[in-house]
Amino acid sequence: MEEDLSKKKCIPCEGNIPAFDYKEIHKYLNKVDGWEVKEDNNKSFYLIKDFKFKNFQDSQKFVNQVGSIAESENHHPDIFFGWGYAKIKIFTHAINGLAESDFILASKIDKIIND
């Protein structure tokens, strides 16, 4: 049975763990819906996903819900949004890469759309 990451809690990272390697990232990527893994100029991996909406108000409502989840999980993504779209970028700042909590947060964000 596939593990439901949205039921887990993000664990604060103080930089005392290694970032996931490519193999570990892909194991977790199968547990979230439609997120892409990209690499920045520093060779650090992050998750990113585009969301589409009918109008500005729907985009704003979504990012407000994402903000509430981020606060309750104490894990804060980068959020970009405007009329009819939102883009969410997730990574663990303390390790400049990805950890399980990033995938947990992605899964919780997906629940906003899928519920």
Image (cartoon, rainbow, N blue to C red):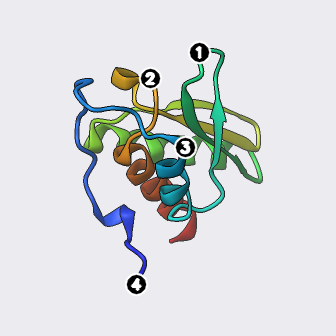
Residue neighbourhood size for the residue with mark 1, other residues' Cα within 10 Å, grouped as few (<14), some (14–19), many (≥20): few
**Could you tell me residue 14's position as x and y percent?**
22, 25
Q: Secondary structure at mark 3?
A: helix
Q: Earlier in the sequence, mark 3 or mark 4?
A: 4
Cα–Cα gap, marks 3 and 1:
15 Å
Q: Earlier in the sequence, mark 4 or mark 1?
A: 4
Q: Earlier in the sequence, mark 3 or mark 2?
A: 3
Q: Amino acid at mark 1?
A: Asn
Q: Which residue position holds label 3?
A: 22
Mark 3 touching mark 4, by CB under 8 A?
Answer: no
As drawn, is 89 to the left or to the right of 11?
Answer: right
Residue at image coords 34%, 36%: 75
- Residue 1, percent across and down? 40, 84
Which of the two discs, 3 and 2, sits closer to the camera? Answer: 3
Horizontal arrangement in the rendering, residue 37 relative to residue 73 (left or right): right
- From mark 2 to mark 4, how far is it between C-alphas? 31 Å
Q: Are marks 1 and 2 in contact (CB under 8 Å)?
A: yes
Q: Residues within 10 Å of mark 2 (few under 14, many from 20)?
A: some
Q: Residue furthest top?
A: 42
Going by the numbered disc 2, the residue's amino acid type is Asn
Q: Depth check: give the residue in front, 12 or 83.
A: 12
Q: In the image, what residue occupies the spot 56% across and 32% down? A: 45
Secondary structure beneath dot 1 equals loop
Where residue 42 is drawn, which disc sits there?
1
Instruction: State the residue position of label 2.
Output: 96
Instruction: Tell me the residue that label 4 is attached to.
Output: 1
Work out how far the residue at label 1 is from the one at label 2, CA to CA, in angstroms.
9 Å
